[in-house]
Amino acid sequence: MNFIKFHPTKDITNFHNNANRYFYNHLPSTECDCYFPRIDLYENDESVFIEAEIPGVDKSDIKITLQDNILTIEGEKKKNKVSDGQTCLRSERTYGAFKRNFKLYDDINRDNVNAEYEKGILRVILSKIQPKDPEERTINVK
């Protein structure tokens, strides 16, 4: 029998992500200067993997921070400037700043986080640790 981890904020997070995806896919790029990179999140017994699809973003424009159980990936996909004498006839790609936050579980080793960027894919690798068993202690009644 497999047990499913209970995540009390999962429904709210799913709603938020679905709403962001809807607006990302349905707003014309001429009306929205935003970029929402696609994310894959998976795990095995030793690690958790976050892969972000961010083609056209320089490695130097990506910032990854870890603070208070929140991993943040942020950066900017910059629009190429049209050269003198050129007129833009169509622009369908999206550009702009992005920021994605991920709440980490207690079994993540915050001292062992690695990131790789290759061919437009950012891969963040978070090592797992065995969570400590809660200590039992006796409380004296006064």
Image (cartoon, grey):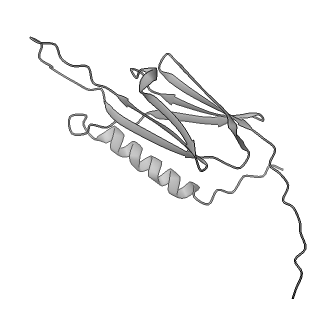
Furthest toward the left, the residue is 85
Say if 17 sits above or below 98 in the image. below
Q: Residue at x 24, y 37 (%)?
A: 28
Residue 122 in the figure: left or right of residue 127: left
State which quadrant residue 71 falls in: top right
Residue 6: image x %, image y %? Answer: 69, 57
Q: Residue at x 20, y 34 (%)?
A: 30
Say left or right for 84 vs 107: left
Q: Position of residue 67 (x, y in %)?
A: 57, 46
Q: Is residue 137 above or below residue 55?
A: below
Q: Nearer the viewer, residue 5 or 125?
A: 125
Say whether residue 74 is left or right of residue 31. Answer: right
- Observer-nearest residue: 8 or 60? 60
136 with respect to 93 (left or right)? right
- For this orientation, the residue located farthest to the top is 85
Residue at figure coordinates x 39%, y 37% from the top left: 98
State how many labels appear.
Answer: 0
Please, is residue 79 above or below residue 20 in the view?
above
Give the quadrant of the C terminus: bottom right
Q: Residue at x 37, y 45 (%)?
A: 22
Q: Which quadrant would residue 42 be assigned to in this image?
A: top right
Foreground: 44 or 61?
A: 61
Judged from this view, the residue extending furthest toward the bottom is 142
In x, y percent, where is residue 19?
40, 50
